[in-house]
């Protein structure tokens, strides 16, 4: 088999995009000293989840929330209104005192909230000058950079740059392509939709000589890594790590199925794609927990699509379009939590759920238009369950010209928003062990502008975790 220099570089680049890491690098030891034996799983609800029908007022409280909700969301045919009796109570809004409840499709999530105390609901999360474009807003959430400051890559990616090198695989996207949250230019990331399908990108037209090709790649990577030229060093180092990882990670599928067949069936019974994605994460965590060589990812990203509910959104029906999605989310989260609990890892795994924006309170026919701020969810055995932040002011008189709830950082505003960067920063500081100053220096940038309208003062001490 003949392999040209050009062909090698093309294949090396493909390997670098697949991912990498052998966890014997000095930088890994430094990073693991921060995150320790913990994991971070980020879930995107792609399309703009309707936050007001995810966490819904049951009573008025001091702000007339239920009255405002009923005035703008009707019941009956095509209506999005969730009747009071259908909601799953979760407690009082910290600002208005209004009682709040989950959508009836979130019964499994309510179990985790009510019985385990392991769900934090952070209300009114957004950013200044919000954008109603899916692509632009998703880019802002994934980058953690609403102001467009001189930061490249994703918010998790910039964090990873501070503790890992090109021979490491600190993160895996359970996606078909590299998610924006994990993008950076220092270390490598695997993208694996299904472990049993994953492998090194050999030229399988000539499958008989795969062993020879492996030997050739191994030698070429070693040669490139020793040139002293930055681009060749990077290609050689990441390529070698990818080669090893492509052989280690697929085996996690069979290991998990052999060891945890009952839990695998639990995901299978849900019979939804998101549950299958969570099972892939569980397989990798199971491998790390067992000490499988060359497997050490601690950060994961996955997504659930379908939330762009302009029409046929559905109200309380758990089989309606929105209800179907929320039930898939809740059932998958519950199965994942129970799996981790059985592994003894539930208190060491944090799952963060976000969507690029919420939906407007005033329904549009039988659907809802793009909105602004909405709720985030944090789930885990070390999460201090409860309601955080303020429910957005959905009174018609309080809405901006777009019909959306305005963002505010004014301390005197009883409906003050939670900036998404405070949730990210609190997660990095309190969960991933990153120093406060390093977060501001390398990951998240404060805004310039009026302090009541922009994020000019950080709060990375949101009380979200059990000490």
Image: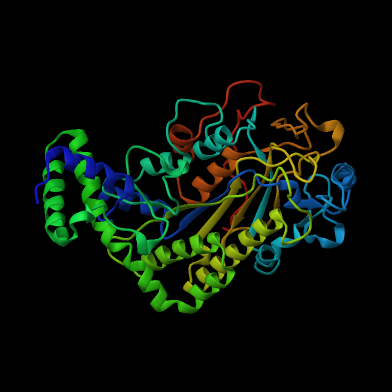
Residue 74 vs residue 462, the one in the foreground = 74
With 260 as the anchor, is 117 left or right in this view?
right
Residue 252 picture location, percent across and down: 35, 67
In terms of image quadrants, where is residue 68? top right
Location of residue 108 by image quarter: bottom right
Q: Position of residue 317 (x, y in %)?
A: 77, 60
**Image coloring type:** rainbow
The residue at 11%/38% (across/down) is 227
> Where is 437 relative to 88, above or below?
above
Residue placed furthest toward the top: 449
Residue 204 lies in quadrant: bottom left
Q: Residue at x 75, y 61 (%)?
A: 104
Say left or right for 296 vs 149.
Answer: left
Q: Height in image: 217 above or below 272? A: above
Residue in the image at 20% along x and 40% along y: 9
Q: Residue at x 87, y 47 (%)?
A: 74
Of 261 and 322, which appears nearest the observer? 322
Q: Seen in the image, is 405 located left or right of residue 186? A: right
């Amino acid at each position: 088999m003949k392999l040209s220099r050009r062909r090698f570089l093309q294949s090396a680049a493909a390997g670098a995009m697949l991912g990498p890491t052998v966890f014997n690098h000095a930088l890994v030891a430094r990073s693991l000293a921060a995150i320790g034996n913990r994991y971070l799983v980020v879930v995107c609800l792609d399309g703009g989840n309707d936050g007001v029908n995810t966490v819904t007022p049951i009573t008025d409280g001091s702000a007339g929330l239920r009255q405002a909700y009923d005035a703008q969301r009707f019941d009956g045919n095509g209506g999005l209104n969730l009747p009071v009796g259908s909601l799953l109570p979760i407690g009082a809004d910290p600002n208005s005192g209004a009682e709040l409840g989950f959508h009836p499709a979130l019964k499994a999530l309510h179990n985790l909230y009510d019985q385990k105390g392991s769900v934090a609901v952070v209300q009114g999360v957004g950013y200044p000058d919000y954008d109603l474009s899916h692509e632009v807003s998703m880019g802002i959430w994934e980058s953690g950079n609403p102001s467009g400051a001189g930061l490249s890559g994703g918010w998790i990616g910039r964090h990873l740059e501070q503790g890992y090198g090109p021979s490491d695989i600190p993160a895996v996207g359970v996606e078909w392509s590299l998610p924006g949250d994990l993008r950076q230019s220092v270390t490598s990331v695997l993208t694996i939709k299904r472990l049993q399908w994953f492998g090194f990108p050999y030229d399988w037209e000539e499958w008989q000589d795969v062993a020879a090709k492996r030997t050739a790649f191994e030698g070429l990577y070693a040669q490139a890594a020793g040139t002293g030229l930055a681009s060749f060093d990077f290609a050689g180092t990441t390529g070698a790590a990818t080669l090893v990882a492509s052989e280690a990670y697929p085996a996690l599928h069979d290991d998990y199925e052999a060891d945890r067949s009952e839990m695998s069936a639990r995901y299978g019974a849900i019979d939804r794609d998101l549950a299958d994605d969570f099972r892939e994460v569980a397989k990798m965590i199971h491998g790390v927990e067992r000490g499988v060589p060359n497997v050490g990812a601690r950060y994961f990203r996955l997504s659930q699509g379908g939330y762009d509910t302009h029409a046929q959104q559905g109200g309380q029906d758990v089989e309606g379009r929105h209800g179907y999605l929320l039930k898939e989310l809740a059932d998958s989260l519950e199965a994942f939590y129970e799996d981790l609990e059985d592994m003894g890892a539930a208190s060491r795994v944090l799952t963060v759920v976000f969507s690029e924006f919420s939906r407007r309170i005033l329904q549009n026919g039988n659907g809802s238009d793009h909105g602004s701020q909405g709720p985030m969810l944090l789930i885990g055995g070390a999460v201090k369950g409860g309601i955080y932040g303020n429910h957005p002011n959905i009174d018609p008189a309080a809405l901006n010209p777009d019909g959306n709830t305005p963002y505010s950082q004014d301390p005197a505003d009883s409906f003050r928003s939670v900036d998404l960067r405070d949730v990210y920063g609190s997660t990095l500081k309190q969960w991933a062990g990153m120093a406060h100053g390093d977060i501001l220096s390398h990951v998240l940038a404060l805004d310039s502008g009026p302090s009541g309208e922009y994020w000019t003062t950080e709060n990375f001490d949101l009380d979200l975790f059990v000490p």
